[in-house]
Amino acid sequence: MKQTYFFPLSFLIPNFEGETINVGQFSLRKRRWDTSTFDFATLATKHKLHLPYQLMDVLIGKCNCELAIAGKDTFEAAADTLQSFRLGLYLQGVSPFLVPYSTTESINDYSGVNERDSAISRGVLPKIESAFSSHNHELEAWPMELTTQCMVIPSAFGLNSQKIESAVAFAQAWGELASDNPTLQVVTRTSASAVVLGSYEQSILHIWTAIEALFKSVSSEVNFRLSLYLAQLCAEGEARKVFHSNAKSAYNIRSKIAHGASKKVTFEQWKQAWDLLLASVSAIEKRGRLPNEEDLLDELLSAST
């Protein structure tokens, strides 16, 4: 049976008019109510939670909005679509963010459920009116990112309608590209997991596993060849020289980290690797496919003749 799944989005700030933006099967909704510990305890005793309610209570504190994805057969299918949408937001310059869990009901509906259940039992009006109560609905919840740790960009939490619509368009295109391409699935998962690691160093190494996965045949002269392929994939004309130099610099940092030779790694160095990953994703989506190394080399040689 087709189902709508709801994903609270931590840190992000909705900057659009109205309560909701609807684009196809996606709905971005502002959070309307606080959710009490007693609400989550009620969900734990009367509903189907696959994670401790105490974690839900703690992790929802920085949530200002949620994403609803309709028409999915399973939680796993909805979560895959969520990851593509999130990657689309990152391409719009939005900061990395967390998605602590997913539910089958909106946070705006299950907020106040403890008092509402009691009010309905007593035959009085609840303080927060909603069609959802334990008397007529069963909520199910699944864990996603059970952490408060994230590599954020504090100046980039805002969400407007244009960013949301662009992310939806990307998610639809990327979902089709990645559906039968394991390499692009690795890239999607890495964009989510790299930002929750405990240090810039570990995050950079993780980011580079995704970038290197794009060029499987590269096993020698790695820095030079990866930088060359990245420049050809992501840039055009004279911009390739700058991109190539930037990629080489970023890979040098990755190598120093991997060999224990790096000094303190900075946010700027982390973002350099992060931006390379996003540039690669954007280029692949615009091309409509993942070109292999021979394709890129042919392009480069053709352009030079």
Image (spheres, rainbow, N blue to C red):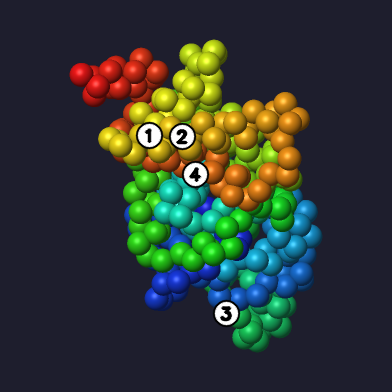
The answer to whether residue 163 is seen in the rendering is yes
Marks 2/3: CA–CA distance = 58 Å
Q: Nearer the viewer, residue 173 or 266?
A: 266
Marks 1/3: CA–CA distance = 60 Å
Read off the residue under disc 1. 241
Q: Earlier in the sequence, mark 2 or mark 3?
A: 3
The answer to whether residue 178 is seen in the rendering is no
Where is the C terminus found, in terms of image quarters? top left
Circle 3: is it few (<14), some (14-19), or many (20+) Cα within 10 Å? some
Of labels 2 and 4, the one closer to you: 2
Q: Name the side, left or right, on which 59 lies relative to 231.
A: right
Tell me, yes or no, whether the two marked residues, 2 and 4, touch with CB atoms within 8 Å: no
Read off the residue under disc 4. 275
Residue 121 vertical position relative to residue 52 in the rendered view, above or below: below
Q: Amino acid at mark 1?
A: Lys
Of labels 4 and 3, the one closer to you: 4
At mark 3, the secondary structure is loop
Q: Amino acid at mark 2?
A: Ser
Q: Earlier in the sequence, mark 1 or mark 3?
A: 3
Read off the residue under disc 2. 245
Read off the residue under disc 3. 129
Marks 4/3: CA–CA distance = 44 Å
Instruction: Using the rendered view, name the quadrant where residue 204 is placed.
Output: top right
